[in-house]
Every structure is written in structure tokens, then in C-alpha cells.
Amino acid sequence: MNSALGPRDANLSGAALSRVCLHPKATLAASTLGSSLAFIDGSVVNVALPALGRNLHASAEGITWIVSAYLLTLSALILLGGALCDQYGRRRVFMIGISLFLAASLVCAAAPSLPVILAGRSIQGIGAALLMPNSLAILGAGFEGEAKGKAIGTWAGIGALASAAGPVLGGWLVETVGWRSIFLLNLPVGAAAAWLAWAYVAESHDQRPGAELDVLGALLITAALGLLTWALSAASKQGSDPSPIVAAAAAGIVLLVVFLLVEFKRGQKALMPLFLMNDSSFIGVTLLTFFLYAALGGLIVLLPYVLIRACGYSPVAAGAAMLPIPILISLGSRVMGKIAARVGSRLPLGIGALIVAFGLGLYVRVSSDPGNYWTEVLPATLAVAVGMAICVAPLTTTVIGSVDADHVGAASGVNSAVARIGGLIATALLGFVFAAQGSRDALLFSAHVAAIIGVAAAATGGACALIFIRQSTKD
């Protein structure tokens, strides 16, 4: 680099970087490739769960932990990951996250047993919690005005494409190479992102005085979610001793209450700023996010598993069955963004969540017939996809519009964490479904019960949106 402000030497504030971003294309490529690691891995593992369970001799509880171990560390630490860039630099934290993710991917690919792969998945979640918020922060610092909007739109579009391609590509790899290959897929993508970041992305950080990391809050929420997740997963094991399960659940609830008290006391310095809940619209969109993404997260994990184990689908076909959801969300978000700008977010969010509930209800029609896709699976998946397409853009608009400009970043972070916590809890509860291994009919019956619970969750989210969200939010 010829400039004195070359990317490996600069240490700039976000405002300064936006004026000297020397390599915008490389910066965008590094950010999107890095975030794609998490997007791909979050979806590709789901189609491999039956193969993983067989090869590693995992119980129903173990199968849920293959997903939950990743979601647990990601959910608990994603807010801390975003805050770390304030003190240590966006590029530095981004590259540390990629390094952790790739090292953990190697551990998962070589794992000889369930405990080893669970350790790898936990470290993957830590890596994702560092790289995901900072991938977007790099774009926020490196671009401004219309260019920033285009860059973030490209980032979101590639993320949607990665989420759509992940299950199909993962299914093909499981069939042709084996489940270990899905973790090796991360290596070239992550290596390219790390090299681009090192070579072309300038370091930047926020230079606000007195910034503090809420390490205590991160430890408390991680311990609380870990105990609650273990209790929910362990409860699905037949004949298990209820005493440690009840004790773990009680301890998790106590730690969660302590976490909320600590966050309330820290005020604006909190990992999860509770003062945002002073706004009824933010309360409504937070509750909607939790219930809606719990229902969606459970579906994304459960549907491929049931299609493979109970309906005789190949991993590729099971992955392809999920394609309507990311495709319709991607296509519908721009349209719904314009509609929400005219009519407000309250009605679209309420109606969209109720359509998701209707679609989940249709899954009770799914039978063990391998030819059931067009008549049973697709109608339900399309309804869920349409409902989510209606919700996604208005949800983001409501999060941003319900708080002051100074707190948009905090509100977005809280909303993202709540969405992942909802998915984490839903995944832990799926242990009761995975435990139904006796026959296809038993597995399908448990899946139908889970679908009905999903209906209740999505409908509750829609009701929260209609009750709490104001018709118009702050500009």
C-alpha cells in the first residue's frame, strides 16, 4: 500500500474510514464472505443431523446439542462480539472470529465422538458471535450515504443466497462425500475472507471515552441459557432423574433474573440495555421476534430431519424442500419495506405472523409417503415463507423506528440476540421429537405436536405485534 493510511497500519474512527476506504470492493467481499460462514453453517448442519446421529451414536439429547451448542454461544455472546470492536478494532475482532470458526470447523470435521463435535460447535458459535456483528460494522465504517445502503443490501442478499444454497449443498455433500465434508466447506470461504480483510480492510474502532465491556453480563446470560438449554434437552430423555433437571432449570432462572438486575443497574453500559423496553413498540417487536423466530428456528431444524427419517427423502431433497423460505423472504422484503413505509408495520407484522401460524398448522397433514412433497410439504412451506416475507422488512423497520437514533445499534443487537435465543429454546425442545425413534408414525406424531406448538408460538407473536406496536413509530 502506498498511502500512509494503508489498511494494515491505519487506526481510524468510523467517520474517518468512510472517507478513505481504499478498496471498497475488497472490503465488501471480505465482509460478505465472512458472514456467509455463519449463514451457511447455520443451515447446512440441519440436513446432516440424521447422518451425524447415526455415525456418532448420538441420543435424542445429543442430536439437539449439535445445533444447540452452536446457538448457545452465538446467542449469548453476539452482543459482546459487537461491543468488542469498540475497544479492539473491527477488523481485528472480525479476523479473530474467522480464525476461531475455521479452527473449530477442523475440530468438527475430524471429531471421533459426540463430545468433541459439541466442543467444536461451541467454538464455532463463539467465532460467529465475533465475526457476524463486525462484518456489518466494517461496512458501516467503510461506506456512507447511498454506497452504504447498496453495500448492506448486497451483504443481506448474499446472506440470503448462502442460507438458501446451504441445505441443498450440504445434502449433496452428505450423500456423496459424507457429513465431515460440510465442515471442510468452511475452510476456503473463511480463508478468502481472512486474507481479504488482512490485505485490504483498514482497521477502525469507535473512540468513545469510558466504554466498558459488560463481561459479567455475558457470563451470566451464557450460564443461564446453558443451564436452561441442558434442562430442556435432558428432560426429553426417557427415564431420566428429574432432580438434576429441576435443579438446573431453577438455577438457570435465578441466573437469568440476576442477569436482568445487573443489566438494569448498568443502564446504557449494559450488554442488553433494558431501558429500550420503555417503548411499547420495542416491547411488541421483541416479543414478536422471540416467538416468531422460535417457531421458524424449530421448523428449520425439524423439517429436514423428519423428511429424511420418516418420509424417506434424500438429504439433497430434504434440503431443497426448504428453498421457498429464503427465496420468498429475499424477494418479498423489498416490496414489504415499501408497503410498511406507507401503512405502518403493525398490521403487516400481525398478519404475517398469523400466516406463518397457518402454514405451521398445515404441517400436521404431512405423512410418511415419500411422494408427499407437492400436496403436503410444499403448501405448508409456501405459507410459512409468505408469512415470513411479509414480516422481515417491517420487523427491521419497527426495531429502528421505535428507538432514538443514538440507540439503533443497541436495539438491532438486542433484536438479533432475542431471535437466536428463541431458536435456541425451540431447538432444545425438539429433543422430545428426536426421542421418538421407535417408528415413523411415532416420529411423525411428535412432529405434528411440535407443529401445533409452533402455531401457538407464531400466533402469540402476531398478537403481541397487534397489541403493543403503535401504528406509527418514531422516524
Image (cartoon, helix red, strand yellow):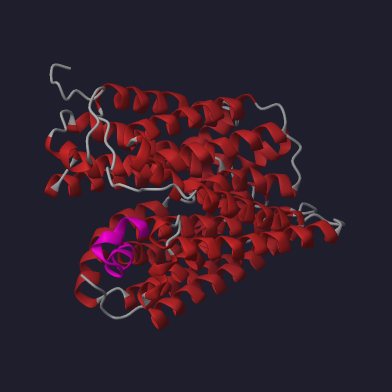
In this view, the residue in front, 147 or 14, is 14
Q: Which residue is painted at 44% across and 50% down in the image?
A: 79
Quarter of the image for the N terminus: give it. Answer: top left
Q: Which residue is painted at 72% across and 57% down in the image?
A: 231
Image quadrant where residue 277 sits: bottom left
Expressed as whole percent of the image width and height from the top left, the position of residue 24 reads 18, 33
Expressed as whole percent of the image width and height from the top left, the position of residue 15 reads 17, 43
- Answer with left or right where residue 137 lies relative to residue 448: left
Indicate yes or no whether the magenta region holds residue 404: yes
Residue 259 visible somewhere in the drawing: yes
Q: Which residue is painted at 61% across and 71% down in the image?
A: 452
Quarter of the image for the C terminus: give it. Answer: bottom left
In this view, the residue in front, 164 or 153, is 153
Image quadrant where residue 37 sits: top left
Question: Magenta span covers which residues?
Answer: 396-410
- Answer with left or right where residue 15 lies relative to residue 108: left
Q: Which residue is painted at 42% across and 59% down in the image?
A: 414
Extreme top residue here?
Answer: 2
